[in-house]
Image (spheres, rainbow, N blue to C red):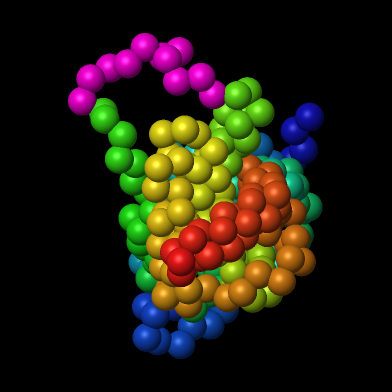
Amino acid sequence: MSHGNMNLTLKVWKQKNKDTKGKFETYLAKGISPDMSFLEMFDVVNEQLINEGKEPIAFDHDCREGICGMCSMYINGRPHGPKEGVTTCQLHMRSFKDGDTIVVEPWRSAAFPVIKDLAVDRSSFDRIMSAGGFVSVNTGNAKDANNILIPKPDADEAFEAAACIGCGACVAACKNSSAMLFVSAKVSQLALLPQGKIEAQQRVLNMVHQMDEEGFGNCTNTGACEAECPKSISLENIARMNREYLMSSAISKK
């Protein structure tokens, strides 16, 4: 069911780079179709701005299919906006009403410095992955798919953890800017499968160490991360990672 087009007021965070102070600017979004995605609405606003000789709003996007994790916007106080289980590119304007004022900000975390406006630098996530994302398995020749038997519950849990797209909504939702949900999803994805078991101990130590180096905050288990994750990654991963970390720390100290 499609309603008529909407006129909206946007209060958007504008910031030249991480070293300058930012501020909210007000924009009018006119004639917006409820069937547009939030990013398409931004495209329309940017087109209007360019036509008026003004600077467009910088925001991150790539696949626009809910897979890449780049469309990180804090919309009316929630990462990726008011709907659960969606990224910003999957959020439709029918979630808002004609005449609404929408406040849009970048992720706020010391570990995600602002590149410009709504685009933040998430390379801290890449560095955490580099610290742990390796397996020392012989990949030289193809093996039969069924010669490493993986219990179905392990495979399912690894698959669910691997659904994490690294968007950073968990960090943005957390009052401490903790990256525990992201890191634990990646640890689980690698540690639950036999190929990842060999380095599991070193990997969890490396990744947690890198997470701390990057300046993410501590986890106090408020659960905001799981509630705002567009892929509904489970808090159980954090508990699993804590167990792995404690065991690995004990072994490495021996």
The picture places residue 184, in percent across and down from the top left corner, at 57, 54
Identify the residue shown where x is 64% and y is 51%.
240
Residue 162 lies within the magenta run? no
Q: Position of residue 41 (x, y in %)?
A: 56, 50
In depth, the one of 50 and 173 nearer the eye is 173
Q: Position of residue 132 (x, y in %)?
A: 39, 54
* Image quadrant in which you'd find residue 86: top right
The part of the chain drawn in magenta is 140-150
Q: Residue at horizontal 53%, vertical 65%? A: 250
Q: Is residue 185 visible from the viewing direction of this image?
A: yes
- Quarter occupied by the N terminus: top right
Comparing 67 with 216, the one in front is: 216
Q: Is residue 192 above or below residue 32?
A: above
Q: Residue at x 45, y 48 (%)?
A: 200
Q: Is residue 130 left or right of residue 104?
A: left
Q: Horizontally, is 130 left or right of 212 in the view?
A: left
In the image, residue 49 lies at what x, y percent? 44, 62
**Picture residue at 66% right of the left edge, 65% below the top:** 173
Q: Residue furthest front?
A: 254
Vertical position of residue 143 compared to residue 125: above or below: above
Question: Farthest residue in the left direction?
Answer: 140
Q: Answer left or right for 180 relative to 111.
A: right
